[in-house]
């Protein structure tokens, strides 16, 4: 312990710089690795002169305008829909116990990977999916699957549906997390009650009193959703059109083409993708300004009712419809994983078999092991750096600067399709042959921000009096950290671990690019099967994607209760008593 105590303070002191370097160097290096090839500098292809040939090739690509427009419209519309439905649910059920029920129903959806969610939506809206089966033939008259192009429709409506249903639980839970803060939540609820007492209907009381104070706390999650939706690969790859696809999917295809010269065009496309993401973020900022200007008279005119009762009824229908769609998508995927012969338009298979699970489990043992090992390593690095950085905050008495906070979320705000290509190029330049370590590093970039977000509030709310008392009894900072703070934070730490594992399990593009096809995970296999493989085997892999994070959260809930039950009440006083006796001796 003495050796740890000597090394503890220096490690803690430098941990914020280590974390920033781990996030900043790969992202900036990746951006540089995209910019140089975009302007024609690729020594590996004997291209050592800067030029604009990559951008010229990009502009001459058939359908490039449609690709960019598709990315812009699907990201803006899906984010706007997810936000509006979130606000309507909060406004309708703000004082109702139904809000807690909706939270419990949507909470598990949050840990479902994007690829699995897209596969589930595909099983619902495909011509022979659950939606057409439930209305056939009694309502639709269809005896054969209808001739529609969902998914893969040219307008991207399938993408909008998938992103909306996947990101809605995230925004709702972020909003509920803000309302759960003691000071802000109590203040907003008190103001809401005052507005009700003044005759405002519940919906108008929420929009006029609660929403203006709540929205600034939701801005960063909304921008993260918007940035992800504009450059998403998994959902458009599974649900989106193929000719032409979204810009992000096209960039990925160019990068993986056997013609290596297309990497120049892919890099130019990545630069365009960054500009496109900045454009949609600017559009959202402009939309904020417009809504703010037009809403000011409505907030101050004293009107108590703006059709709140009608809006509330519409919200009830939207909520029920949304939950029904999610439920049917999951049920449909579960049925396909056990389905034998399934004639259309029967709602249920004629026979149930476990053959598909047996075949998939025989094939997935290697991807499963790789998935778990990569997730454990990435999460361990993220948890360690987060705890040490938060401890450094308390040692210095200062929270992270605004720049530090932005750097932590930098991998979430910059399109991953852009800097990951550059990161691969950077790894090639340093001749990194450690594929497993490369993939773990790429996963850490996306796991660390979520782990930090999960742990920061709990760590900062620790009662400092325990540390003060322990220090007065002669305990070192290392002993206070390991023997007092960590046991008190065992619950939040396990939750952060489960969240980190869930984020790592869902990573498709980082695994595909940095792994170079040599490392396969459950997610990469599921996406591959969703684009041309057996529908039944694809359902098994997608369900396995859901089972892994669900097991992680189950263990995170059970382990603190079983292993460390009453640890705070027993171990902490016992340790302090020992220190007091030792001090008196």
Image: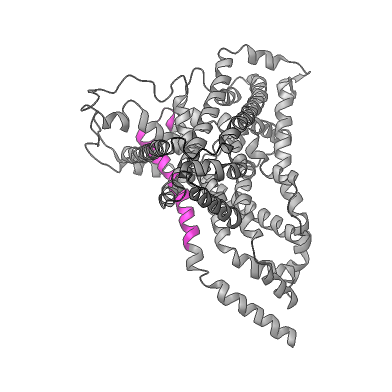
Q: Nearer the viewer, residue 520 or 549?
A: 549
> In percent of the image, x 36 and y 27: which residue is there?
126
Which quadrant holds the N terminus? bottom right
Q: Quadrant of residue 311?
A: top left
> In percent of the image, x 41 and y 53: which residue is there?
97
Q: Which of 453 and 177 is in front in this view?
A: 177
Residue 497 makes an appearance in the image:
no
Q: Is the magenta stretch mostly helix, strand or loop?
A: helix
Give the answer, above or below, for where 540 lies relative to 137.
below
Could you tell whether 97 is left or right of 215 in the image? left
Measured from the top left, where is residue 152 in percent x and y? 43, 23
> Which residues fall within the magenta stretch?
530-558
Measured from the top left, where is residue 366 in percent x and y? 48, 44
Q: In which quarter of the image is residue 117?
A: top left
Give the answer, above or below, for where 216 lies relative to 186.
above
Q: Which of 293 and 219 is in front in this view?
A: 293
Residue 277 in magenta stretch = no
Residue 441 makes an appearance in the image:
yes
Measured from the top left, where is residue 516 in percent x and y? 59, 34
Q: Which of 317 and 76 is in front in this view?
A: 317
Could you tell whether 98 is left or right of 82 in the image? left
Residue 539 in magenta stretch = yes
Measured from the top left, where is residue 39 in percent x and y? 74, 20
Give the answer, above or below, for where 270 lies relative to 488.
above
């Amino acid at each position: 312990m003495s050796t740890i105590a000597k090394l503890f303070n220096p490690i803690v002191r430098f941990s914020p710089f280590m974390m920033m370097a781990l996030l900043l160097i790969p992202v900036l290096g990746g951006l540089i690795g995209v910019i140089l090839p975009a302007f024609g500098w690729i020594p590996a292809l004997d291209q050592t002169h800067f030029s604009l040939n990559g951008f010229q090739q990009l502009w001459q690509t058939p359908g490039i305008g449609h690709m960019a427009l598709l990315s812009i419209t699907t990201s803006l519309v899906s984010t706007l829909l997810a936000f509006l439905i979130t606000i309507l649910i909060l406004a309708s059920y703000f004082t109702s116990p139904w809000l807690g029920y909706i939270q419990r129903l949507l909470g598990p959806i949050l840990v479902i990977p994007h690829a699995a969610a897209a596969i589930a939506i595909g099983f619902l809206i495909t011509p022979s999916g659950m939606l057409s089966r439930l209305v056939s033939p009694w309502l639709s008259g269809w005896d054969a699957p209808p001739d529609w192009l969902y998914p893969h429709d040219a307008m991207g409506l399938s993408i909008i549906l998938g992103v909306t249903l996947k990101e809605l639980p995230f925004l709702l839970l972020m909003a509920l997390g803000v309302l759960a803060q003691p000071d802000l939540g109590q203040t907003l609820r008190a103001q809401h009650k005052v507005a009700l007492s003044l005759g405002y209907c519940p919906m108008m009381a929420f929009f006029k009193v609660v929403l203006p104070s709540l929205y600034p706390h939701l801005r960063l999650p909304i921008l993260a959703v918007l940035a992800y939706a504009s450059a998403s690969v998994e959902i458009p790859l599974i649900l989106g059109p193929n000719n032409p696809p979204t810009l992000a999917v096209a960039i990925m295809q160019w990068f993986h083409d056997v013609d290596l010269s297309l990497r120049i065009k892919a890099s130019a496309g990545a630069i365009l993708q960054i500009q496109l993401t900045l454009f949609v973020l600017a559009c959202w900022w402009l939309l904020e300004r417009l809504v703010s200007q037009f809403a000011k008279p409505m907030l101050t005119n004293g009107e108590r009712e703006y059709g709140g009762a009608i809006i509330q009824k519409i919200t009830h229908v939207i909520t029920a419809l949304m939950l029904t769609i999610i439920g049917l998508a999951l049920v449909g995927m579960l049925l396909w994983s056990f389905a034998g012969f399934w004639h259309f338009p029967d709602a249920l298979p004629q026979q149930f078999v476990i053959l598909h699970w047996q075949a998939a489990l025989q094939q997935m043992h290697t991807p499963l092991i790789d998935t778990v090992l990569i997730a454990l390593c990435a999460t361990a690095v993220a948890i360690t750096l987060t705890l040490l950085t938060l401890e450094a905050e308390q040692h210095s008495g200062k929270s992270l600067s605004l720049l530090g906070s932005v750097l932590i979320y930098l991998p979430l705000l910059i399109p991953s399709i852009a800097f990951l290509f550059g990161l691969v190029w950077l790894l090639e330049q340093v001749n990194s042959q450690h594929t497993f370590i490369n993939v773990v590093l790429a996963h850490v970039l996306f796991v660390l921000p979520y782990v930090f977000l999960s742990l920061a509030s709990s760590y900062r709310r620790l009662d400092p009096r325990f540390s003060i008392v322990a220090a007065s009894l002669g305990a070192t900072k290392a002993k206070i950290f390991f023997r007092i703070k960590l046991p008190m934070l065992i619950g939040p730490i396990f939750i952060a671990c489960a969240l980190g594992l869930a984020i790592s399990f869902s990573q498709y593009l980082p695994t595909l690019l940095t792994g170079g096809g040599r490392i396969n995970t459950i997610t990469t296999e599921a996406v591959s099967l969703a684009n041309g493989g057996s529908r039944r085997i694809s359902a098994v892999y997608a369900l396995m994607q859901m089972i892994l994070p669900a097991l992680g959260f189950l263990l995170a809930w059970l382990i603190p209760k079983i292993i460390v039950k009453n640890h705070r009440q027993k171990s902490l006083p016992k340790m302090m008593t020992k220190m007091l006796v030792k001090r008196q001796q």
